Image (spheres, rainbow, N blue to C red):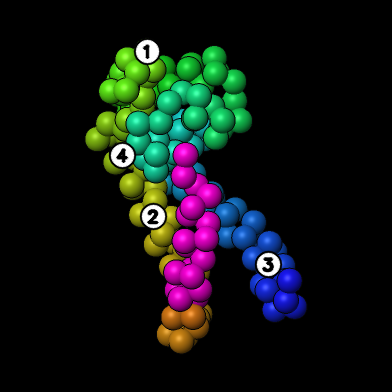
Amino acid sequence: MSKLRNTCAHELMDITPHIIQSIRVEMRRGRGSDISVPQFRTLRFIQRHPDSSLSYLAEHLGLTLPSVSKLVDGLVKQKLLVRHESSVDRRQLMLLLTRSGSSIVDSARSEAQQNLANKLNSLSENELKTISEAMQLLRPIFDSQDKH
């Protein structure tokens, strides 16, 4: 591994947890008080991965299948999530957000994005462009690991 590549990996490992924590704080702030953090994480995951199964959601959340089933039941009762049969295997249930569920996630995400943008106020246009270009380079590397 080249020295520069190793330095980049080190920098990514150092700053990423701070960025993630900042995003989490902002997203939680915008989620509303009627929704727990695990419920919000569930909605966000289903938004990114529509038609996910309970098993895939449980794996992502690090919870047991019965725990996730109970979590999903609560979101279905609140009309934030719907279950439907898989078109491939009718024994398997898939999960989708309702408009209300999507609205909660979109609103929290929009607020968080605005607050993060405010944190970048001290950077110059050139610095912002550099960060944007770096993110575009990283996206295909890390997006491929997020597919199921």
Q: What's the amino acid at mark 4?
A: Ser
Q: Disc 2, disc 3: CB below 8 Å?
A: no
Q: Earlier in the sequence, mark 2 or mark 4?
A: 4
**Tag 4, which secondary structure?**
helix
Q: Which mark is residue 25?
A: none
Q: Earlier in the sequence, mark 2 or mark 3?
A: 3
Residue 12 is a magenta residue: no
Q: Earlier in the sequence, mark 4 or mark 3?
A: 3
Left or right? Give the position of 3 relative to 30.
right
Q: Nearer the viewer, mark 4 or mark 1?
A: 1
Name the residue located 53 percent from the left edge and 57 percent from the top edge.
142
The correct choice, above or below, for 56 with respect to 127 in the image is above
Q: Earlier in the sequence, mark 4 or mark 1?
A: 1
Q: Which mark is residue 9?
A: 3
The correct choice, above or below, for 30 with respect to 139 in the image is above
Q: What range is drawn magenta here?
A: 131-148
Residue 76 in view (yes/no): no
Q: Which mark is residue 91?
A: 1
Alpha carbons under labels 4 and 1: distance apart: 26 Å
Residue 137 is a magenta residue: yes
